[in-house]
Amino acid sequence: MRSLPLLPSLLLTVVISLIATTVKAQPNPHYVALLNDSMWFYEAQQSGRLPSTHRVPWRGDSALNDGSDNNIDLVGGYYDAGDYLKFTLPLSHSIALIAWGGIEWFDGYQKANQTEYLRNTVRWGTDWLMKAHPSDNELYVQVGDGEIDNNYWGPDTGIPSDRPSYKITSDAPGTDIAALTAAAFAASSYLFRNQLNDTSYADALQSHAESLYNFAETAQPMQLYTEAVSASKDYYEATTYTSPLVFAALWLFRATGNTSYRDKASNYFDQFKLGSMQVDVMDWSDQTGAVYVLGAQLDGSNTKYKDAAKKYLDTLINGGDPCSYTSGGLLWCGGDSDLNSLVPAQDTALLALLYGKIDSPEADYTDFATSQIKYMLGDNRMLTPYVCGVHMNSPHNPHHAGASGGTDISNIETSPPEEKYLLYGAIVGGPDQEDKFYDERNDWAQTEVALDYNAPFLGLIARQLSADTTEDPPYVSITEPRPYVTRSVRLEKWLVAVIVIVCIFVVAGLLYLCWCKRHAMANSWRAKQNNKAEAV
Ligand SMILES: *[C@@H]1O[C@H](CO)[C@@H](O)[C@H](O)[C@H]1NC(C)=O
Ligand SMILES: *[C@@H]1O[C@H](CO)[C@@H](O)[C@H](O)[C@H]1NC(C)=O
């Protein structure tokens, strides 16, 4: 009699544990792979002596004398894009975004078992930034000469050895880059202290952040770093130093808890009138949009941040000036999207989701962000996920010297015809305004890859994992090949001139013919009138 209730209760236990295992679902494996691959891309960009954890088989140690011209060790860090230059500005911007996404969606990295890769990705950048900041008022901002480097196309074994290093100092300051690098240090410090549990590294990062911020604030005149280092001017000239100053102060407040940074941020925000700035897409050149969202997150009682954030996101997302949408649904912001269309879309989606964390459900920008994520993962006219190496329709020709396997700079496009190595996880520039993508290695606007293209992507994917998104990314169900498209014919000015001249000649010729035949024409008209008259 006693054994009878045992059986149902046993069954019940089995059923409950079965349900429990199904409910505690595994993370979507495609998003796990995307997160993994997009950090693999950063390993492909590693400069210096590669660490034992390095996973890219075709990369080796390189640029081992960086900094020697200034008797300093600047070995390491990341190459910026498809070339072998190292730039502090987009690196710092990228590190700040990666750290921010890592802090907010750390559970996404945990579910995907990728926290150690997050640690390595950020740390390879910040270790180098520490080297680049050897004393309080000195920050190296570029290694390698743009002219020399951009005339080299080949593997990491043949990088031209003439690699000058450039710095800002008290006498030649750069407010934007000192502040933005302070922001990268402070955001990473928060991540290492609170998510990655490495207090001593977090302390080191914090002390660099505070020192650099002091440099940014005190060195006069306040100016863009490209005023001091003209070598960077053609590559990474920021549009303002005001937003980095506020962005960094906010991150320092978060990292240190010191309210004087919160007050500095608020004062600069007012002084520079950031609240009434014309809306401009947040990217490496201007962090104003990021200031709004971070300020709203950290200083909630100060409604100016929240108001500005909502206005900013509402304007962009509703396609207000300077943005609109392509017919395929990609956010398109004039002036920015032409150079790398997926960057404004991703950066705006990232800010939208970050803002959604603090002001939900009132301001729900999730649909917008999801639409942009889906677009870049295959829900587009080209049936193409704009991530290398994840699908047969992925870009095959990223503009990347190392991955291409080519050595002939005058024949980047065709030599070799097929890219030698897969650049897993790299986000390319993206399609044009007609949603067309040609996958041409030499078309750097569409196919170049860069540190700051992948940075928002890490956050977006970590967020999908954090939200337990079960739906597969769109490319998973795409079985058709990428459709073939040709470029729309754009009439050149000389062609228009020729057409106009030809038309003038034709019209003039017709008029001349009429003139010659005027008597005959007049006669026939008179004849017709006479006939009519007779008929009446
Ligand atoms: C991460 O990427 C590497 C290189 O492609 C691969 O070997 C590894 O299996 C991937 N891991 C996951 C979890 O996808
Ligand atoms: C850091 O500690 C927290 C709390 O104990 C834990 O949840 C987290 O997984 C740790 N992080 C790492 C990278 O181990």
Image (tube, rainbow, N blue to C red):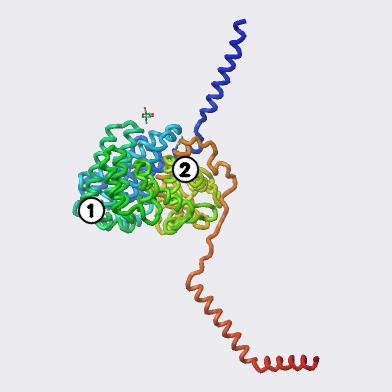
Q: Position of residue 313 (x, y in %)?
A: 44, 50
Of label 2 and label 1, which has the lower sequence position? 1
Asked whether residue 434 appears in the rendered view, the answer is yes
Q: Residue furthest right?
A: 535
Is residue 353 shown above or below 344?
Answer: above
Query: Of the residues tagged 2 and 1, which is closer to the observer?
Result: 2
Q: Which mark is residue 362?
A: 2
Question: Element under label 1?
Answer: loop
Asked whether residue 414 appears in the rendered view, the answer is no
Q: Which mark is residue 303?
A: none
Q: Which mark is residue 173?
A: 1
Does the residue at mark 2 contact the one at mark 1 (Cβ under 8 Å)?
no
Is residue 522 shown above or below 23?
Answer: below
**Amino acid at dot 1:** Pro
Residue at figure coordinates x 37%, y 47% from the top left:
292
**Amino acid at dot 2:** Glu
Q: Position of residue 423 (x, y in %)?
A: 44, 45
**199 or 303, nearer to the observer:** 303
